[in-house]
Image (cartoon, rainbow, N blue to C red):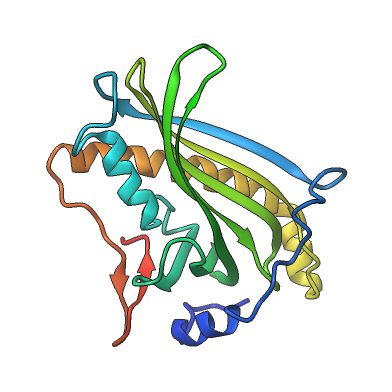
Amino acid sequence: MRFTAHPDPARGLREIAEYRLNYDPSDTEGRGWHHDRVRHLLGDEVPGEPVADGPFRLACRLVHDYEFAHPKIMRAYFHADAPLVGRDMLLEGRFTVLRFPMGVRVDAEVDEVRDRADGTRERSWGWSYRTLEHHLERGRLVYEVIKNLDTGRVEFVITGVSSRAAIPNPVVALGFGVFGRWTQTRFYRAASNRLARLVAEVHAGAPRPEPRRIGPGDVVVAPTG
């Protein structure tokens, strides 16, 4: 827990590179585990494969760069030149004046066309991360941009499985017990709304926000703003 931003994100990233997952991915059922799925409309395209500079492609770029997160709730430091899969991210959760550094690791990229239950087909692109040691939570989040190839509808979908981690600090543990779930669902809503707004603005001609480089290396912070 801190009252300011991380003083040395590059060092923080070196530290979490040594961390392991803080949970067993095969054991995410039972009491205390939350299974979430949030869908949010981003726009519409003509049916068929995604078009250049359409909502799908714009959203994919923003999701790749973690620009969808609301800066008053969460920011992330990571190496811009690192491959997406395997990328370590030093998240900085924000609650009032407090800052909580937490490590995650990107474990998979989603890039596929699949059949839907309603008989239509959809293209999906996105990625997921898992939580590392010393994180306040345990679990995995998947961020996907999905286009229905038959209708042209483009959505942002967040799928999560999570539970509270062991928190040694009793004050932080109490605060997380009271506000943790509320903050989590608030993050889902704020991220979905922010991404929809950014897609609409960039599609209308505004410059696309990009992670800001900090220091002499390739470490960046996202989202901007």
Split into 4 quadrants, where in the image is the C terminus?
A: bottom left
Q: Nearer the viewer, residue 97 or 94?
A: 94
In x, y percent, where is residue 152? Answer: 32, 21
In the picture, residue 117 is in which quadrant?
Answer: top right
Spot the residue most to the left: 205
In x, y percent, where is residue 20? Answer: 69, 73
Residue 86's place in the image compared with 202, above or below, is below
Q: Residue at x 28, y 18 (%)?
A: 47
Q: Nearer the viewer, residue 211 or 4?
A: 211
Spot the residue most to the top: 119
Residue 93's place in the image compared with 203, above or below, is below
Residue 96 in sight here:
no
Please indicate whether residue 31 sits to the left or right of residue 196 in the image: right
Spot the residue most to the right: 31
In x, y percent, where is residue 52? Answer: 19, 37
Q: Nearer the viewer, residue 213 or 54?
A: 54
Residue 43's place in the image compared with 79, above or below, is above
Split into 4 quadrants, where in the image is the N terminus?
A: bottom right
Q: Residue at x 40, y 71 (%)?
A: 82
Q: Nearer the viewer, residue 143 or 164?
A: 143
Report how many numbered discs are placed on residues in the image. Answer: 0
Residue 59 in sight here:
yes
Please indicate whether residue 109 sits to the left or right of residue 117 in the image: left
In x, y percent, where is residue 30? Answer: 87, 43
Q: Residue at x 28, y 40 (%)?
A: 57
In the picture, residue 172 is in which quadrant?
Answer: bottom right
